[in-house]
Amino acid sequence: GIQVEQSPPDLILQEGANSTLRCNFSDSVNNLQWFHQNPWGQLINLFYIPSGTKQNGRLSATTVATERYSLLYISSSQTTDSGVYFCAVVTRAGSYQLTFGKGTKLSVIP
Amino acid sequence: SQTIHQWPATLVQPVGSPLSLECTVEGTSNPNLYWYRQAAGRGLQLLFYSVGIGQISSEVPQNLSASRPQDRQFILSSKKLLLSDSGFYLCAWSVRGLVGYEQYFGPGTRLTVT
């Protein structure tokens, strides 16, 4: 099956700093989503981005499908950005399954 | 707007007891529905998905089962829980019939089997 690798596994930032999270995947995809899991476990949809670039406030994402990677940018980080960020993909093989990476645990300290 | 509910929020059950977790979606018709589990650690794994009433597909063999008695209701069950069934269970929905469309998750049920 498809492999989804996220880096770095852990990241500690000072409030106000910028960061880039990376997601590599091993096969062509027709869905790629970025999620933020908050301390209560809720998975919050950040981006649906099988290709191209999107921006939402301080967050933006870019997926280069031909090179099989996606990047999530967080600018001017805040303590509320803390949590685990997941990348998840669906392959073009017709599966409904979202395959998740292991996540990046972000800690933003004041 | 669409909302997805799960209950209970937390559950502590002894080994060998039955299980029933419920998920309902509001504000949409004929959704695809999904059950995922997040064990200790971070990754989520798809357990079941459904494209319509009574239509269930299993992704991982186990002692769990799923049912869809109504269009917007999805139930996860077990006759006898194992210790390894502990975890965080999340229900999700997406637009029906469209592979690869965006999935939205409920708040989850945290299950501890003792």
Image (cartoon, helix red, strand yellow):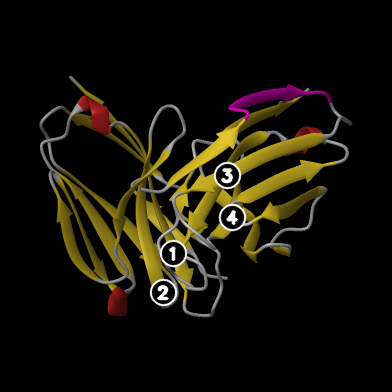
**Residue nearer the viewer, A33 or B74:** B74
Mark 4: few/some/many CA within 10 Å (<14, 14-19, 20+): many
In this view, the mark in front (4 or 2) = 4
Cα gap from disc 4 to disc 2, whole angstroms: 19 Å
Quarter of the rendering containing residue B48 = bottom right
**Residue nearer the viewer, A84 or B14:** B14
Which chain's residue wears label 4?
A: B
Q: Which mark is residue A101?
A: none
According to the picture, the residue beneath numbered tag 3 turns out to be B24
Q: Which mark is residue A89?
A: 1
In the depicted structure, whether residue B112 falls above or below residue A62: above
Q: CB atoms at circles 4 and 1 under 8 Å apart?
A: no
Question: Looking at the picture, which amino acid does disc 2 mark?
Answer: Val
According to the picture, the residue beneath numbered tag 2 turns out to be A29
Quarter of the rendering containing residue A14 = top left
Tell me which segment is drawn in magenta.
Answer: B8-14
Q: Residue at x 49, y 43 (%)?
A: B4
Q: For the residue labelled by badge 1, is the local secondary structure a helix, a strand or a loop? A: strand
According to the picture, the residue beneath numbered tag 4 turns out to be B34
Mark 3: few/some/many CA within 10 Å (<14, 14-19, 20+): many
Q: CB atoms at circles 4 and 2 under 8 Å apart?
A: no
Q: Residue at x 12, y 45 (%)?
A: A57
In this view, the mark in front (3 or 2) = 3
Q: CB atoms at circles 1 and 3 under 8 Å apart?
A: no
Same subunit, labels 1 and 2: the answer reads yes
Q: Position of residue A39 (x, y in %)?
A: 41, 27
Which chain's residue wears label 2?
A: A
Cα gap from disc 4 to disc 1, whole angstroms: 15 Å
In this view, the mark in front (1 or 3) = 3
Mark 2: few/some/many CA within 10 Å (<14, 14-19, 20+): some
Q: CB atoms at circles 1 and 2 under 8 Å apart?
A: yes
